Amino acid sequence: MKPKILFVDDEENIVKQMRWAFDGDYQVFTALDERAAIEAFRKERPQVVSLDLSLNSERPSDLAGLRLLELMMEEEPATRIIVVSGNNEEATVLNAVRLGAFDYYSKPIVLEEFKVMVKRALHIHGLHQRLQTPQQTGGQDFHGITGVSKSMQEIYRFIERVALSDISVLICGESGTGKELVAHAIHQNSPRKENPFIVVNCAAIPDTLLESELFGHEKGAFTGAHMQKKGKFELAHTGTLFLDEIGELAPPLQVKLLRFLQDRSIERIGGNQKINLDVRIIAATNRDLKKEMDNNLFREDLYYRLKVVPITIPPLCERREDILPLVHHFLQKYGREHRKPQIRISPEAEQRLLSYSWPGNVRELENLINRAIVLANGSILSPRDLGFPVEKSSDDFNLKEAKRAIEIEYVRKALLRSRGIVSRAAKELGISRVNLYELMAKYGIPIEEFKSGTTAPQSPTNKDQEPWD
């Protein structure tokens, strides 16, 4: 069956042109106003929508397309909506992207370009549909990222939505959560995937060398500059430049990065010629850049340039359902690498992994499994192999206790975030109010202590039992 596409535009000649151009490969539906667009969308549920922002020639400031965009994304989030308009105001474009637009096209329409954009939209729509049923397909891996939790599924959808635009992305999260993997996945889902993906860790290079590393230098620019050198920006031309730990960037380099984001050109150190470049910037940080900005350590204008589309990766302790899938992923990966393909993990070790707080996040888990496989004598990893000390009361520690500890932690955190409003906490946990009341009674969790919103959730992890103190 041919895929469905809906064209919404108040200019009848444009609608007729689109029908003529797309009718052979698609089921084409059209609408000239807001009401007709809603009816056609709800009846046909098209995979792709081409949506004009202004549907009233007498009142061009009335951006009915934005209202339609918001409604369509709320009713059918998988739909890929291409916003089309003669209004090129940046604020309007960014607003459309924030509301969920797949891409933006400025009139007049060039059919060959527009057809390519529609094909990309269909491709991403199909990818999104496959991601909706990871448990049925057994798929836990998304471009090198492993996770089955709700938060990770949302990150996969985020990657799909931003990949095909060139908007700057700021990835936030604690060290070890996988920020570089997310950046690489965005690149791999973009039209730039065949072009360079260049990584620069701003914290790993001294300030005196970082400017040359990023922007390059001309011969004789400084002592030791014996030849011309291209920087990472030039090496990333037509591709993606990932700036990790962007919060470590010194103020003078923040100015140069801002200048590039504004005019898309650089100058090498010691040079006076502008070099125009086509580079997408993705940045990452484990710092609170808003706080750094308030303390005059990070430029406000650069912060908002980078933060056009932000995403935060939650720490591993907040998505415990991803722990065991990650464990089995690393067992397979390092089992093959160290020629121990039959390596497994004991139930007792699984329990300890589930109850540990993971301050180092996924990187800590990966290093732990890698080390355990290398040092283990047998084919089944025990808690001792993983670096956990043997407990005196180990006979009392079982899967039931691990489940109890996790349930207590999740209930307390949900009640804390909802300030003791049980209906909100139950919705966050994905259970009914009755079930939540039962859990509170079962574990003796009083509702009164959460009403003020100041109670800190208790961790089920015994700090004395954590490896690598």
Image (cartoon, rainbow, N blue to C red):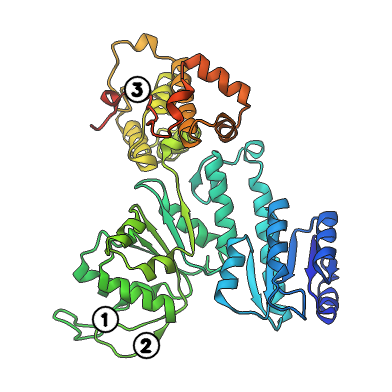
Q: Disc 3 or 1, which lies upstream in sequence?
A: 1
Q: Disc 2 or 1, which lies upstream in sequence?
A: 1
Residue placed under numbered mark 2 in the picture? 274
3D distance between C-alphas at marks 2 and 1 = 13 Å
- In the image, 132 versus 219, the foreground residue is 132
Tell me the amino acid under the disc marked 2. Lys
Residue 169: x %, y % from top left: 47, 62
Q: Name which quarter of the figure residue 41 lies in.
A: bottom right
Residue 398 can be seen, yes or no: yes
Q: Is residue 29 above or below residue 337?
A: below
Q: Is residue 264 above or below residue 94?
A: below
Residue 295: x %, y % from top left: 27, 60
Task: Report the residue that reaches farthest toward the bottom.
Answer: 272
Residue placed under numbered mark 3 in the picture? 383
Tell me the amino acid under the disc marked 1. His
Q: Disc 2 or 3, which lies upstream in sequence?
A: 2
3D distance between C-alphas at marks 3 and 1 = 52 Å
Q: Name which quarter of the figure residue 434 lies in.
A: top right
Residue located 59% across and 52% down the image: 157
Disc nearest the viewer among 2 and 1: 2
- In the image, 457 versus 217, the foreground residue is 457
User: Could you tell me which secondary element the residue under label 2 belongs to?
Assistant: loop
Q: Residues within 10 Å of mark 3 (few under 14, many from 20)?
A: many
Residue located 37% across and 9% down the image: 395
Is 224 left, or right, of 313 in this rendering?
left
